[in-house]
Amino acid sequence: MQTLDVISVNIWQMLASLANLILLFLAVKKFLYKPVMKMLDARRNTIQKDYDDAAAAKDKAVSDQKAYEEKLRGAKEESDKIIKTAVGIANDREKEILAEAKLKADGIVRQAENDAILERKKAEDGIRKEIVEVSALLTEKMLEREVSADDHKRFIDSFIESIGDENDAD
């Protein structure tokens, strides 16, 4: 029979191949695997940091939104308070203006009444003077003589008293 040299097992060659494989594995592990793993860990940490930052930004946005809504409520309450205060001040001012207007109107009415009384007295005095003059003329005509100043004064006083008594009776 013939020996097959082609399929022979060479132990030294297998050991050398195994040693080469182990050396290649160690070299790949030392120079490629560790740096690649280091790079993957850094990338994983960066991604995790980005996720954490996004979650923190979301939490901050939610808290900022709540703070904004609270401030908005506070501003609305304050604006309502300011409006109520302004309405109260306006109502008070309205009352003051109405009171001043009433006082002025009362003053005008009193002044008009006083003016009317004065005008009435002036008119009465004017009428009395005319009556005195007419009565003096009539008396002079009736007596056909000159009336002395004392007589004239007595006639006038008695006439005015009689007119005053008639007005008081009305």
Image (cartoon, helix red, strand yellow):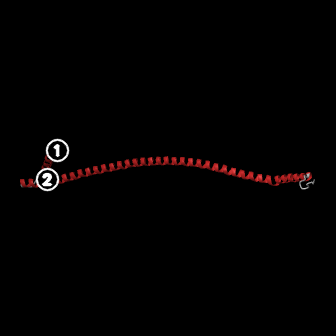
Residue 170 shown left or right of residue 37 in the figure? left
Residue 147 shown left or right of residue 110 in the figure? left
Q: Residue at x 39, y 47 (%)?
A: 91
Residue 5 shown left or right of residue 57 in the figure? right
Q: What secondary structure is found at the residue carrying circle 1?
A: helix
Residue 61 coordinates in the image, percent (x, y): 60, 50
Q: Which residue is mark 1?
A: 168
Q: Which residue is mark 2?
A: 131
Of the pair 8 and 129, the residue shown nearer to us:
8
Of the pair 112 and 157, the residue shown nearer to us:
112
Residue 165 coordinates in the image, percent (x, y): 15, 45
Image quadrant in which the C terminus is located: top left
Which mark is first along the chain, 1 or 2?
A: 2
Disc 2 and disc 1: Cα gap in Å?
Answer: 18 Å
Q: Residue at x 63, y 50 (%)?
A: 57
Q: Residue at x 25, y 52 (%)?
A: 115
Q: Residues within 10 Å of mark 1 (few under 14, many from 20)?
A: few
Q: Amino acid at mark 1?
A: Asp
Name the disc covering residue 145, or none: none
Q: What secondary structure is found at the residue carrying circle 2?
A: helix
